[in-house]
């Protein structure tokens, strides 16, 4: 006999894992169940014209399923799979709710949806040819020139799709989704591989679209989601088993409940610890030895010069690295790793470096376990189980073939692989890409502990400001002109580094009552006040 709560367990409700004090009313009837023992979804997000509606929650919790229902690709079965459920029954179930009007359109099959999928690496496999041709073929809203200008696509229009970097492909995919004429827009993660400046532009374009169309956005960069969405639905449950999508909440309250780990109206604890942000910059109370001196270096490519001002790295610290795309961060990593030689010909080879590249590719049919065993002799130790495999959620993936993993799974394997190797210095390039918020939190802890335990230095390049805030003890800041020149300075203490970096971008953050940083509206009173005071991030 199946549990009435989820239909997947036998007389034992899996909700107990969630500490649900009172079952929310929405849970009386599921929206959709894939099969007798398959994933079940409760609740749907509500597309609203003139608004960006955010969805906040882990991967595998039913967001795509919800979108397939809202776009008419999947007919909801209300949890009944023994027989065909009619639209009449479905609409009756939604009578009196805000979703009724919308679902009536879906039932009439008149809804047209435009979707930016989460993983975009399939695009060059499906569409052949030049960027410009793909964009022109989809230019239904006649805004292409605007998008090309804002997202700086002019230099890649003649490029073949198969040659694009992840950040370029992301901007192309977003442009295609925004260009279509549709009744409903669904954007599944827009920030991976974009720098902060590009994230802000993407946010602006999404808001412009939402003035006249309903947009639903799934986004794990919370600072950006907070800025772009008016309302959010929190999605929670047990990935791959069941998912619950809450009713909409104001974005500030919704994000805070999510970070707090307690969804108040529903009375559900979704995490047993809150996420807290430092309000003054981090001062490590540990005395740290010096691990290495970063030498002064220059590296010139045709059309691009990187200058590194030097500095020192301490044992056990995590250094955040911030700077625009195309400003020389990867080149810097390669110089330290001895993969590239500086202009003076003196290769830097005093430390061993373990490097996780920004774009992780899977081209082996080896299993995850096989790959990790090759990188470490400690695979069977309890340390490795507790500090790497379990927190990164790799236990269920060990026997999977690497080339069958999703982007988020592959990212976690790549992080584990990087930390498994013996090295003096670890460099992780955009570890947050494709990870959900929960996974970003856990990864932050895993990386910090690895630095302490190994007495190594760890450098983390990332564009998610919450991740950078939580993970870094000090900051390296890259300044310059993307694609032309870069200057690496620091390491700075957090406050100084954030002021320097955000000052270059002209972006200020205020604090809400809980201490969470929120991006100020450009030109707002606080934005002007903080700029005048030179306080861009740690400001109360
Ligand atoms: P999200 O978008 O939040 O990552 P999805 O809606 O894609 O989540 O998937 C939620 C769960 O539903 C996953 O465990 C997935 O394996 C399962 N699922 C998706 N499509 C089907 C299907 N056609 N049949 C059975 N299970 C499915
Ligand atoms: P980031 O990691 O900050 O995005 P990169 O270090 O990858 O930046 O690139 C900085 C600049 O150097 C870019 O303009 C890039 O095209 C150029 N560049 C990087 N590697 C090479 C190379 N091997 N040959 C020529 N130009 C390169
Ligand atoms: Mg790079």
Image (cartoon, grey):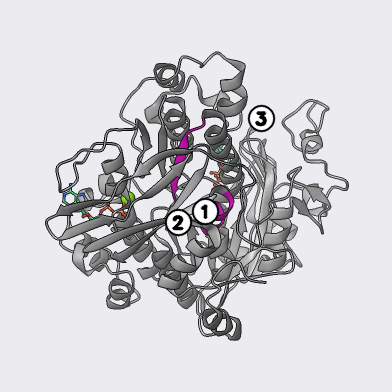
Mark yes or no: residue 218 visible: no
| Residue identified by numbered label 2 | 463
Which mark lies nearer to you, 3 or 2? 2
Horizontal and vertical percent for residue 10? 79, 25
**Distance in Å between CA atoms under marks 3 and 2:** 39 Å
At a point 51% along the width and 25% down the height, the residue shown is 397
| Residue identified by numbered label 3 | 37
Looking at the rendering, the quadrant in which ligand 1 lies is: top right
Residue that lies at the very extreme toward the right in this rendered image: 22
Looking at the image, residue 432 sits to the left or right of residue 135; the answer is right
| Residue identified by numbered label 1 | 468
Mark 2 surroundings: few (<14), some (14-19) or many (≥20) residues within 10 A: many
Q: Nearer the viewer, residue 337 or 114?
A: 337
Please tell me whether residue 434 belongs to the stretch shown in magenta: no
Looking at the image, residue 142 sits to the left or right of residue 440; the answer is left
**Distance in Å between CA atoms under marks 1 and 2:** 7 Å
Image quadrant assignment for residue 505: bottom left
């Amino acid at each position: 006999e199946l549990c009435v709560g989820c239909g997947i367990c036998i007389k034992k409700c899996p909700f107990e894992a969630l500490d649900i004090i009172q079952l929310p009313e929405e849970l009386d009837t599921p929206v959709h169940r894939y099969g007798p023992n398959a994933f079940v979804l409760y609740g749907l997000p509500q597309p609203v014209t003139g608004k960006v509606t955010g969805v906040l929650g882990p991967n595998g919790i039913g967001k795509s399923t919800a979108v397939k229902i809202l776009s008419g690709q999947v007919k909801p079965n209300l949890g009944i799979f023994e027989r065909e459920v009619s639209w009449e029954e479905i609409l009756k179930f939604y009578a009196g709710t805000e979703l009724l009007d919308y679902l009536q359109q879906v039932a009439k099959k008149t809804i047209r949806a435009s979707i930016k999928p989460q993983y975009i690496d399939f695009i060059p496999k499906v569409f052949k040819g030049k960027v410009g041709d793909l964009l022109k073929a989809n230019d239904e809203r006649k805004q292409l020139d605007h998008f090309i200008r804002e997202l700086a696509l002019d230099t890649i229009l003649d490029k073949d799709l198969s040659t694009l970097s992840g950040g370029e492909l992301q901007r192309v995919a977003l442009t295609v989704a925004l260009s279509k004429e549709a009744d409903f827009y669904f954007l599944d993660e827009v920030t991976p591989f974009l720098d902060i400046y590009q994230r802000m532009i993407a946010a602006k374009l999404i808001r412009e679209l939402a003035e006249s169309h309903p947009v639903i956005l799934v986004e794990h960069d919370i600072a950006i989601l907070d800025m772009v969405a008016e309302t959010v639905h929190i999605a929670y449950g047990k990935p791959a088993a069941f998912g619950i999508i809450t009713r909409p909440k104001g974005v500030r309250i919704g994000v805070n409940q999510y970070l707090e780990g307690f969804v108040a109206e529903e009375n559900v604890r979704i995490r047993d610890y809150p996420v807290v942000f430092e309000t003054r910059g981090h001062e490590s109370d540990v005395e740290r030895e010096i691990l290495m001196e970063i030498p002064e270096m220059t590296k010139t490519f045709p059309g691009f010069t990187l200058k590194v001002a030097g500095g020192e790295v301490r044992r056990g610290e995590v250094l955040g690295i911030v700077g625009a795309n195309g400003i020389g961060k990867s080149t810097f990593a390669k110089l330290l790793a001895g993969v590239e030689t500086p202009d003076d010909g003196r290769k830097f080879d005093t430390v061993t470096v373990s490097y996780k590249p920004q774009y992780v590719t899977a081209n082996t049919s080896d299993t995850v376990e096989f790959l990790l065993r090759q990188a470490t002799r400690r695979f069977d130790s309890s340390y490795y189980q507790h500090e790497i495999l379990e927190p990164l959620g790799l236990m269920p993936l060990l026997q999977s073939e690497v080339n069958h993993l999703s982007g988020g799974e592959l990212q976690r394997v790549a992080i584990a692989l990087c930390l498994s190797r013996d090295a003096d210095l670890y460099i992780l390039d955009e570890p947050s890409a494709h990870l959900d918020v929960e996974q970003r939190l856990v990864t932050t802890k895993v990386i910090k502990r690895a630095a302490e335990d190994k007495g190594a230095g760890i450098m983390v390049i990332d564009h998610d400001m919450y991740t950078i805030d939580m993970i870094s003890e000090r900051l390296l800041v890259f300044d310059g002109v993307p694609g032309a020149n870069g200057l690496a300075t620091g390491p700075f203490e957090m406050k100084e580094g954030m002021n320097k970096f955000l000052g270059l971008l002209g972006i200020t953050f205020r604090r809400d009552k809980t201490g969470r940083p929120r991006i100020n509206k450009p030109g707002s009173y606080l934005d002007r006040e903080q700029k005048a005071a030179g306080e861009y991030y740690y400001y109360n």
